[in-house]
Image (cartoon, rainbow, N blue to C red):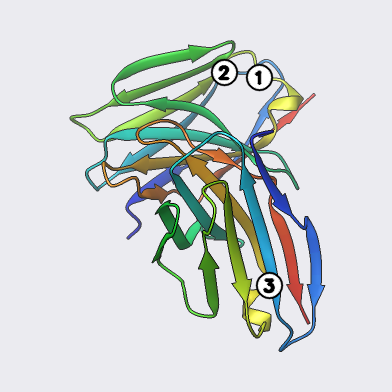
Amino acid sequence: NAGVTQTPKFRVLKTGQSMTLLCAQDMNHEYMYWYRQDPGMGLRLIHYSVGEGTTAKGEVPDGYNVSRLKKQNFLLGLESAAPSQTSVYFCASRRRQIEAFFGQGTRLTVV
Amino acid sequence: KNEVEQSPQNLTAQEGEFITINCSYSVGISALHWLQQHPGGGIVSLFMLSSGKKKHGRLIATINIQEKHSSLHITASHPRDSAVYICAGSNTGNQFYFGTGTSLTVIP
């Protein structure tokens, strides 16, 4: 997973605080995704991007915003964190019709 | 009902055993992916296949398009194979459908 880097790896937030998660890939991939992973559930898509300057909502977008100003970076923002957003967040990237590459995950706790 | 179902949810095996994890899907997909996630770790892609069979070392993945079914086999299992294995389908729109994962524990 050297090609997809997520920062930070761990974070504890208080309810109502904001933060931005950064995903960076160096493989020139068009597609980038943000997922959350919760116990007993599969990976759920928050937002995704099919290219620089474009973003789209996924399955669970509420409470999150994203931006992709540069092709290599995909930012996930939480404007006002809630305990329900406690989760592990994964970023992924891929080129069309090839395997996906995932980051190491960000473990976020909202207290 | 999830678009992708895996079985079993949990699996414990003795070192050296042959292991099979199954995946069934109900949506149209262009490729089937097998992913591996070690405890507290990131997610790694093991296989991407659209037909037939692929082999990497002790791991073998097969897919039956007509039956919408895939299997992941691990031969001569080892404790380092202990991980969660995730099945996922992707479509031509590059969306993914994920299973909930199979947690494998291999006991020495």
**Real-space CA distance between mark 1 and mark 3, rounded to the nearest whole angstrom:** 34 Å
Q: Are marks 2 and 3 on the same chain?
A: no
Disc 1 crowd rating (10 Å Cα; few below 14, some 14-19, many 20+) is many
Q: Are marks 1 and 3 in contact (CB under 8 Å)?
A: no
Distance from the alpha carbon under mark 1 to that under mark 2: 6 Å
Three-letter amino acid code at the position of disc 2: Phe
User: Which part of the image, by quadrant, shows the N terminus of chain A?
Assistant: top right
Q: Which residue is mark 3?
A: A86
**Residue placed at 68% from the left, 52% from the top?**
A105
Give the residue type at disc 1: Ser
The chain that hosts pointer 3 is: A
Q: Is residue B107 above or below residue A16?
A: above
The numbered dot on residue B18 is 2
Label 2 sits on a secondary structure element that is loop
Q: Earlier in the sequence, mark 1 or mark 2?
A: 2
Give x and y (percent) for residue B7.
45, 42
Do marks 1 and 3 share a chain?
A: no
x and y, in percent, of residue B24 in the image: 33, 40
Do the residues under discs 1 and 2 have CB atoms within 8 angstroms? yes
Q: Quadrant of residue A22?
A: bottom right
Query: Is B39 or B21 nearer to us in this picture?
Result: B39
Foreground pick, A88 / A101: A101
Residue that label 1 marks: B77
